[in-house]
Image: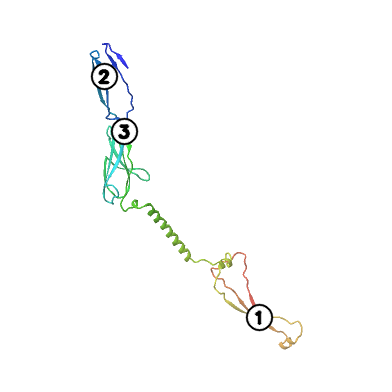
Amino acid sequence: MMEENTDRTFTTRIQKSITLSHEHDGFIISCSARYPVNEGKDVKTSEERKTLSVSYAPKNTSVSISPSGWVSAGSRVNLTCSSRAKPPVSRFTWFKTSRDAPIKVSEGDFYSFNVTDGGVYYCVATNQLGDQTSSEIHLTIEGGVDHLPLGAVLGGIIGIIVLIGLVVFVWRLKSPHPTAHQSQNQPVGETVTTEEGDVHYGEINFSRLRSGPSSVSEQDGGQQEDMLYAQVKVSKAADNVTRTAGVQEDLYAQVKRK
């Protein structure tokens, strides 16, 4: 676009729009113009340069560890957090992950500590325009659980489960079990006892009148006394015998006539 000025000169404008980002910070933009002078006999060039200054929140935030790789318990570890920001980062904050929520462990771009256990660490860089979180860094202790392969850990767990099952199986084999015959013949509600009952002997005297004469009555003098001996075997119940309600005891007697 060209404009004529009051002094009969001309002004030419060229407009360019761009979207700035943190990558444009420090860029140099130049604009130059060439125009004839001395009635077109000569050419003159005019140029102007501008350096862009772009403000932005922290970018490219990262964490480095020294020494790298596996570390031994009790050794010292250094963590460094770096980030690009304009204005510069005003605060670095260190966190350690946990099951419930991240735990704040330190502030500053440099974090040094003695290792007691493994864990996952990261930092957050902050300035007045925003903040950015770094990627996580895994701290592994040499010889610790984190150092073991996943297959070895799973194998150990399976081995423990198998061992527990084997112990339970052997214990069940050694435990006494009632036989099928005993389970079928044993009455419900009654415990079988092995105690033998006492044997009682009794003498029973029966006297009776003979209704008519006989040779037997003449020999015995009118009345004959028959002696009957009974052998009665009674099973004496032990204290631990339990009988079901409504079952009566049976009494068996063997009567012999002499």
Q: Is residue 167 left or right of residue 30?
A: right
Name which of mark 1 and mark 3 comes first in the sequence: 3
On-image quarter of the C terminus = bottom right
| Residue type beneath disc 3 | Ala
Q: Position of residue 83 (x, y in %)?
A: 29, 37
**Which mark lies nearer to you, 1 or 3?**
3
Q: Are marks 1 and 3 in contact (CB under 8 Å)?
A: no
Task: State the residue position of label 3.
Answer: 57
The CA span between labels 1 and 3 is 120 Å
Secondary structure at numbered mark 1: strand
| Marking on residue 256 | 1
Q: In terms of image quadrants, where is residue 33?
A: top left
Secondary structure at numbered mark 2: strand
The CA span between labels 2 and 3 is 40 Å
Badge 3 crowding class, 10 Å Cα cut-off, few under 14, some 14 to 19, many 20 or more, is: many
The CA span between labels 1 and 2 is 156 Å
Name which of mark 2 and mark 3 comes first in the sequence: 2
Query: Residue at 42% across / 56% down in the picture?
Result: 158
Q: Position of residue 134 (x, y in %)?
A: 32, 40
Query: Residue at 33% across / 36% down in the picture?
Result: 132
**Which mark lies nearer to you, 1 or 2?**
2
| Marking on residue 34 | 2
218, 134: nearer the viewer: 134
